[in-house]
Structure formats: structure tokens, C-alpha cells
Amino acid sequence: MSNIIEITDFEAPELDVYARLTESQLLHLYEPEKGLFIAESPKVIERALDAGYVPVSFLAERKHIATQAQDIITRCEDIPVYTADFDILTRLTGFKLTRGMLCAMCRPTLPDAETICAGAHRIAVLENIMNPTNIGAIFRSAAALNIDAVLLTPACSDPLYRRAVRVSMGTVFQIPWTFLGNDSNEWPKQGMKQLKELGFKTAAMALNDNSIPIDEPRLMAEEKLAIVLGTEGDGLTACTISNCDYIVRIPMSHGVDSLNVAAASAVAFWQLCSRKL
């Protein structure tokens, strides 16, 4: 039988994960063990469950328990489901729930780069991208356009932050990913060395006098290619660009010189991974 619990006390400690802990606090909650993260909306939660992520508890709007949240609750019948009406949940969390459901989940142990790149032909490398919305959008494009894995430098926003997960529509659970090292000093020198050892040619997406257009046949001909994307505004660092095998630009019109990194990623993935479609 499902474990439905009516919320009667906003200060109940079991609600801290939804009401009082920041995402950084959730990340470090059980150190040295892995922490928690929040998945939002039934579809996203279902994708996490399908990928093997372990739920701790649910927070669900009362009216959804017997409708769009029902299958998930039935699937996880021993997991506590805290519930109340929409207005109460909004007061508790400080935001309006997307489709009326949240889930606190255990963070997994991340694999190493060698593991997720084994057998990969096209990967994305994200350098210092700090906006969770852009991270989520890049993952969604990566899933849709045949990227085999995503590697992030340590300064990137966490793909398991609630907004990144939501914007990705749960594709962060479907695309293998990990961080390239634990120390920002390891990138780009050590990270680039590792990519080369794994057999990847590297393509920096950047505006540069020495850049080649994205439809250059040499890029498509590469067996293993890492597409390197930089942070909003500043783009890739000069050191990263100089260490890449290719510098690549997206041809544009009307005097536009660049795209948002999430939009640029979609264009790059479509062009450079199209042989797999």
C-alpha cells in the first residue's frame, strides 16, 4: 500500500530537503557519502527511475496522487509521499511545482571519463558553463542528436541541480556524463591530455581568425571527435582553444557573431553527429 502522508507541520525535518536545504547543501548532505538531488515532474522522475536512480521521498500535490503521479507512486509503494494542496506546497517550497510532483533522490557515484567514453565516437566537453538552464538544454540536445557522452570541467554547474534536470526533461539520466577531474587546475592541460589518450580529436567552438566552418569535411571524417563548448559570454579560454585540434565556427548572417551556448550546441551536434542519424 502506498505510504501517503498528509503535511500538517511545515517544520517537520523530513521536509527539509524540499523546504529548507539549498542545492549545495543537498549535494554535500551525507559527506563523505553522496548527497541528494531533487527531480521535478512525473515524466522527469520516471526517467530517473528507469535509469536506476533511487528515490528517498516524494512531494506531491493532492489532486495528482490519483492521476498523473499515480503510476510512480504505485511503482515506489514503500517510499513516503508527502502531500497537500497546491497553495500549501507553493508556500512550503517557495516555487510552483511543475505538474505537481517532486522527488528527493540519492546521487549516484559518477563513473570516470574512460568508462563513459568507451565505444564513444562523438562527445561534448563543457568548459565552465555555470548556468543550469544552459546545462539542461545542452543535455536535451545531446540526447536528441546522438552525442554519446558529456564531460564537464569542475567549474560547470551540476547537471543534477533541479533546474538543469527539469530543462533537460530528464535526459541527464539518459546520457552518460561525468566531471573531468575534481580540481579546476586539471583543465585544460590534463583534461586535454586525457582526451587525446582516449583517441579523440578536439574541436573548439570559437570565433577565431583560424577557425574552419562547421561543415568542413575533415570534421565529419573524424572517427572520434570531442566538441568543446565554452561558458556564456566569454566562450572558451585561449589556452583551451590553442590546445584543440580544430577551431570551428558556425557561419552566420545579419552581423550576428555568436549564439547562446545551448543553441550553438544543438547546431554543432546536428552537423557533426548527422552520420549517425
Image (cartoon, rainbow, N blue to C red):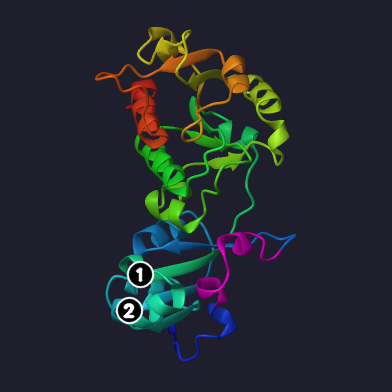
- From the top left corner, tell me how far across and down residue 22 is, in percent: 57, 65
Badge 2 amino acid? Phe
Badge 1 amino acid? Lys
- Please state which of residues 111 and 85 is positioned toward the viewer in this rendering: 85
Residue 86 is one of the magenta-drawn residues: no
**Disc 1 packing (10 Å; few <14; some 14–19; many ≥20):** some
The residue carrying mark 2 is 86
Q: Which mark is residue 96?
A: 1
Q: Residue at x 41, y 79 (%)?
A: 91
User: Which residue is the extreme one toward the bottom?
Assistant: 8
Residue 21 is one of the magenta-drawn residues: yes
CB within 8 Å, label 2 to label 1: yes
- Left or right of 222 on screen, residue 185: right
Question: As displayed, is residue 92 above or below residue 263?
Answer: below
Q: Residue at x 50, y 63 (%)?
A: 38
Report the span colored magenta: 16-30
Asked where in the image residue 86 lies, by quadrant, the reply is bottom left
- From the top left corner, tell me how far across and down residue 104 is, in percent: 51, 68
C-alpha gap between disc 2 and disc 1: 8 Å
User: Which residue is the extreme one toward the left?
Assistant: 254
- From the top left corner, tell me how far across and down residue 256 is, in percent: 31, 23
Asked if residue 48 can be seen in this view, the reply is yes
Label 2: state its secondary structure: helix
Question: As displayed, is residue 60 above or below residue 195?
Answer: below
Q: In which quadrant is the C terminus drawn?
A: top left
Asked if residue 174 can be seen in this view, the reply is no
**Disc 2 packing (10 Å; few <14; some 14–19; many ≥20):** some
User: Which residue is the extreme one toward the right?
Assistant: 32
Question: As displayed, is residue 230 above or below residue 75?
Answer: above
